[in-house]
Image (spheres, coloured by chain):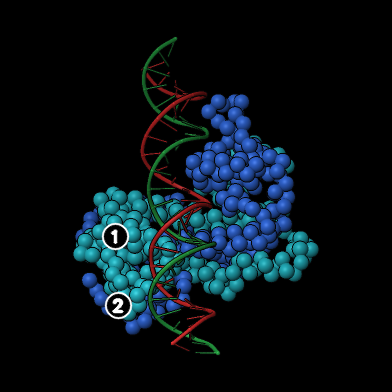
Chain colours: A blue, B cyan, C green, D red
Amino acid sequence: MSNKKPQSMHDASDYIRGQGSAAIGARLRRLSERIDRDAARVYAEAGITVELRWVGALKVLSLYGPLSVGELATSLGISHVSVSQTRNSLEKAGLASSIPDQEDARSRKVQLTAAGCRMIKQLEPLWKILEDVAAELDEEANRVVAALDRLDAALDRSSLHERVAGRLKTGARQAVAHKRPANAGPAMRTSVSRKPL
Amino acid sequence: MSNKKPQSMHDASDYIRGQGSAAIGARLRRLSERIDRDAARVYAEAGITVELRWVGALKVLSLYGPLSVGELATSLGISHVSVSQTRNSLEKAGLASSIPDQEDARSRKVQLTAAGCRMIKQLEPLWKILEDVAAELDEEANRVVAALDRLDAALDRSSLHERVAGRLKTGARQAVAHKRPANAGPAMRTSVSRKPL
DNA sequence: AAATAATATGTAGGCACCTACGGAAATGTC
DNA sequence: GACATTTCCGTAGGTGCCTACATATTATTT
């Protein structure tokens, strides 16, 4: 194994940070969690007890009224299982309730309770501020959201898995033959340093 | 509560997707998990048993040799607790071992085992392919990584929490006075639809 | 009408990260 | 040297998502 230990860990930090696109999965995750932490802190300091996963569900239910687990999952972009778990959590908190769907016995309609509606009233001013800040960040980052849209579209066209599979199918020899810059790094899920040394 | 139920859920899906910057936290998370799922699938189909969280650690250890938990945490941009958990997982798998640091009795140095080094040899061709694909995606998304860098820099300058706190400090009246477009949406952690209806 | 396939949602367990806390060792201050 | 503070890493518990599997209901096919 290579043992070219840097004289200080500053090089390791910079090196990993230099992975660029190779660490995109980890980059996305770190940012996501960074923002989540801050958002959670905002809610906590506002004295509002809210799980972050509630926010999307609360908003969609307040906009559209009772929805099934599947409908919530679709509009939130997560699995029905996650919605089911969120539903349970919301119900335990008294913010939502669910009733059987009269048109389909397999389905349950999730709806806000009065307490849920009151919490939303409480949250709305904070949401306005958060969304103002988000727009500010997007502008400072020179349209990061548009970039995310483009990445989503690229993955819609052809997933990471499909792209890799295509390369493997054309032969390992061809893949090896690709010339990479000397600073080529690890795979998608490599981490990127966020803590200065 | 508003009960303007769309005639079909197609509107709800599009509406949430239209949150733009307001749902950036959730956007980042969805993409992150989307890429992770694909990466995991790639490894699985290659017949390599690897937890995604191992990848960064494996690479850094192979590049720099034994590192302490704290050093790994810094270079991977995650907490020492996560590293500790990953270390345990790696050790259970026989890919890493840890020894006391002779210069600091509080510290443990994590190092690759022979089996760990062999696994890395196995992984390297796949990593090359994954990083080629990542570069392709970055190009198709017109420099999404640069955009993520810019967002990181913006948050480094002033965190989400700080920005919100600043607005709250200047007064709730001022915050309420902000004019928002009619399609103003929920806070950062709102979800975005990824599943077509 | 009966058989088969698809759909809706729940349960169980897992992944990858986190905060809070705690004990031991190292470092800093007086 | 004594004491205070900081650092290192582990434990415990939690968050928010997932896959695999299962059961009941509905839709489609035979």
Q: Residue A69 bears which disc, if any?
A: none
Residue drawn at (64%, 58%), measured in percent from left and top? A43
Which subunit holds the residue at mark 1? B
Q: In this view of the protein, can residue B142 be seen by the observer?
A: no
Q: Residue B102 bears which disc, if any?
A: 2
Indicate the quadrant containing the N terminus of chain A: top left, top right, bottom left or bottom right.
bottom left
Q: Callout 2: 10 Å neighbours few (<14), some, many (20+)? A: few
Along the line of sight, the residue nearer the viewer: C23 or A22: C23
* Residues at marks 1 and 2, CA–CA distance in whole angstroms: 20 Å
Whether residue B173 sits left or right of residue D6 in the image: it is: right
The relative height of residue A95 versus residue B28 in the rendered view (above or below) is: above
Task: Please name the amino acid that badge 1 sits on.
Answer: Glu
Q: Does dot 2 land on a helix, a strand or a loop?
A: loop
Residue drawn at (59%, 25%), measured in percent from left and top? A103
Whether residue A39 sits left or right of residue A176 in the image: it is: right
Task: Please name the amino acid that badge 2 sits on.
Answer: Gln
The relative height of residue A16 versus residue B129 in the rendered view (above or below) is: below
**Where in the figure is residue B35, as x and y percent of width and height?**
41, 55
Which subunit holds the residue at mark 2? B
Q: Earlier in the sequence, mark 1 or mark 2?
A: 1
Indicate the quadrant containing the C terminus of chain A: top left, top right, bottom left or bottom right.
bottom left
Q: Quadrant of residue C16?
A: bottom left
The relative height of residue A37 versus residue A161 in the rendered view (above or below) is: below
- Mark nearer the viewer, 1 or 2: 2
Q: Callout 1: 10 Å neighbours few (<14), some, many (20+)? A: some
Check if mark 1 and mark 2 are on a common chain: yes
- Residue behind mark 1: B91
**Where in the figure is residue B55, as x and y percent of width and height?**
34, 62
**Where in the figure is residue D26, as x and y percent of width and height?**
52, 24
Along the line of sight, the residue nearer the viewer: C10 or A63: C10
